[in-house]
Image (cartoon, rainbow, N blue to C red):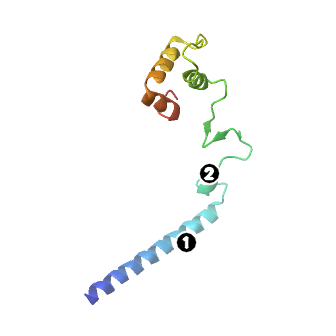
Amino acid sequence: AMRALVAWLLLAACGIAMQLYIARRARKQAETKGASAPGGSLVASLLPQKDGDERTGANLPRPSDESRYQLIAKAIYMPDDADLSHLSENEQRIVKICREDEFERDRLLWGGGLI
């Protein structure tokens, strides 16, 4: 039992040493390439650019107030006798289905919908 414990501790120590060596080598390679080189700085490549559009997050544009999605979402909660002539036939059908089926409404409004 004592031999097995010593063997596992030795194996763990070798694994730790290997991880430290690999991390040190990767850090030195990143320093020699520089932060501006492709692959030089993973963090810098994932962060948004300072001069980029501030209305985006994770490179996904935010829907504007006049988007079709917003019009459909507002129409779903309008009274039943409200005028929906500003919507196409398909959009009117979507509004009708979402008013009747709570699951479909939630699926459309909270993800997995028309986007």
Question: Where residue 20 sits in the image (x, y, percent)?
Answer: 50, 74
Residue occupying the far left of the picture? 1
Q: CA distance from mark 1 to mark 2?
A: 21 Å
User: Regarding mark 1 in the picture, which secondary structure is present there?
Assistant: helix
Disc 1 residue type?
Answer: Arg
Q: Nearer the viewer, residue 39 or 58?
A: 58
User: How far across and how far down the image is residue 71, in percent?
Assistant: 60, 22
Quarter of the image for residue 33 reads bottom right
Which percent across, then down, holds residue 87?
A: 57, 14
> Residue at horizontal 33%, vertical 81%?
8
Residue 75 horizontal side relative to residue 102, left or right: right
- Point 39% across, 78% down: residue: 12
Crowding near the residue tagged with mark 2, few <14, some 14–19, many ≥20 C-alpha atoms within 10 Å: few
From the viewer's perspective, is residue 90 above or below residue 23?
above
What residue did someone put label 1 on?
A: 24
Depth check: give the residue in front, 88 or 80.
Answer: 80
* Chain-order first, disc 1 or disc 2: 1
- Amino acid found under the numbered disc labelled 2: Ser
Residue identifier under label 2: 45
Q: Relative to residue 98, is residue 72 drawn left or right?
A: right
Residue at 45%, 74% (x, y): give it. Answer: 18
* Residue 56 spot, x, y in % from top left: 65, 39
User: Which quarter shows the N terminus?
Assistant: bottom left
Label 1 environment density (alpha carbons within 10 Å; few <14, some 14–19, many ≥20): few
Q: Nearer the viewer, residue 7 or 96?
A: 96
Quadrant of res 39: bottom right
